[in-house]
């Protein structure tokens, strides 16, 4: 009986050791120290500016953007109403907060429709009744844009472009240049429109809008760029698993590679990313593993594990805090002490 117990013990230790080797020697489980309850349907994106957290509600009924106080952990207000009228949004896709020189601006991109700029201080004062101070219609550009985010010198858009993965625009949405590269095709014969679709991903900006991390949804890779003047300069690239797919019926990519990084936060010392590693067709784009990269070199320097599958990450290096949004079992932002 003693021998049997000893054998069981050794088996458990061996299994734990194998699992730890699979995860990586530096992996550790981190436990949340606080939380913020979210009063929304389904978070689409999460942004931090100063002591405020902005969350876009994908399933908003009244207002798309919710604002939370990171000090008190309280919900403050919501704005950006749903609808088709003036000052309303039909499908809010992204949010940017940036320094316009003489004022702080908040920019909202209504997918395929318009970009609306607000005075940040007015938003925080007027709250639910906030109205944009400037609106530009993206249909006037003639470009098929999916994402549109503010940079220091204009805007960066992603979409289906033949001459580059991204397009840089000035503050009036006039074309500056196409830039960036798509991943290499698994087979040269694959159609261009299918390859554009397979390269779909998300872009994440540093708080000062100078740096952008590009991720491909169906590949485990991150490319860090600097937005330098009217150009996009590649700093480094980390590839865990490159994009790989077949083509079905000539028009649909069928992915062989797994999903990669669900969300990225760019700090001044490190770049932090939620890693999924799940099959590309998994309904929810989430992960429980955080990968930490050296900001200057792109070297993977640390991994740690979360308590729950999570979708979005925002890191405040100055305060040593990490804000993680998870939908399981209900939408909540878990707050962690930064373990690095």
Image (spheres, rainbow, N blue to C red):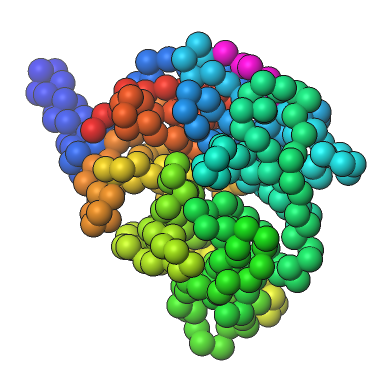
Q: Is residue 231 in sight in this rendering? A: yes
* Residue 6 appears left or right of 149: left
From the image, give the main secondary structure of the stretch colored magenta: strand
Looking at the image, residue 71 lies above or below residue 13: above
**Where does the magenta region start and end?**
74-78
Q: Quadrant of the C terminus?
A: top left
Residue at 68% over, 32% down: 65
Q: Is residue 174 left or right of residue 32?
A: right
| Residue 111 image offset from top left, x and y in percent | 73, 52
Q: Quadrant of residue 162?
A: bottom right
Furthest-front residue in this view: 102
300, 143: nearer the viewer = 143
The x, y position of residue 203, in whole percent, is 51, 54
Compared to 20, does 111 lie above or below?
A: below
The residue drawn where x is 56% and y is 88% is: 189
Q: Residue drawn at (65%, 77%), measured in percent from left and top?
A: 193
Residue 67, placed above or below residue 43 = above
The percent coordinates of residue 105 (x first, y second) are 60, 39
Q: Quadrant of the N terminus?
A: top left
Total residue callouts: 0
Q: Furthest-bottom residue in view?
A: 189
Query: Does the image show residue 311?
Result: no
Queried whether the magenta region covers residue 37, the answer comes back as: no
Q: Residue placed at 44% from the left, 35% from the top? A: 314
313 or 7: nearer the viewer: 313
Percent x, y of residue 295: 28, 50
């Amino acid at each position: 009986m003693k021998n049997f117990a000893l054998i069981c013990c050794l088996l458990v230790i061996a299994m734990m050791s194998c699992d730890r080797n699979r995860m990586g020697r530096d992996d550790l489980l981190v436990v949340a120290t606080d939380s913020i309850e979210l009063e929304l349907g389904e978070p689409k994106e999460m942004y931090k500016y100063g002591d405020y957290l902005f969350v876009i509600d994908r399933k908003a009924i009244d207002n798309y953007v919710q604002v939370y106080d990171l000090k008190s952990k309280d919900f403050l207000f919501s704005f950006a109403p749903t609808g088709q009228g003036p000052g309303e949004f039909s499908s809010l896709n992204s949010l940017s907060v940036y320094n316009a020189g003489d004022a702080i601006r908040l920019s909202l991109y209504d997918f395929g429709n318009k970009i609306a700029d607000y005075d940040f201080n007015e938003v925080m004062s007027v709250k639910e009744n906030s109205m944009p101070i400037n609106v530009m219609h993206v249909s006037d550009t003639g470009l098929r844009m999916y994402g549109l985010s503010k940079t220091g010198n204009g805007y960066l858009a992603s979409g289906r472009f033949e001459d580059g993965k991204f397009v840089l625009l000035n503050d009036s949405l006039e074309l500056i240049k196409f830039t960036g590269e798509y991943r290499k095709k698994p087979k040269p014969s694959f159609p261009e429109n299918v390859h554009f679709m397979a390269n779909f991903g998300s872009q994440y900006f540093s708080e000062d809008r100078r740096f952008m991390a590009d991720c491909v949804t169906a590949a485990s890779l991150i490319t860090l760029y600097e937005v330098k003047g009217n150009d996009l300069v590649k700093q480094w690239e980390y590839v865990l698993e490159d994009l790989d797919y077949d083509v079905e019926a000539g028009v649909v990519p069928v992915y062989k590679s797994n999903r990669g990084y669900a969300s990225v936060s760019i700090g001044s010392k490190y770049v932090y990313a939620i890693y999924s590693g799940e099959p590309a067709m998994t309904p929810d784009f989430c992960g429980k593993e955080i990968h930490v990269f050296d900001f200057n070199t792109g070297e993977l320097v640390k991994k740690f594990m979360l308590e729950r599958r999570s979708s979005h990450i925002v890191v405040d290096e100055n305060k040593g805090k990490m804000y993680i949004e998870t939908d399981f079992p209900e939408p909540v932002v878990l707050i962690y002490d930064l373990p690095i």
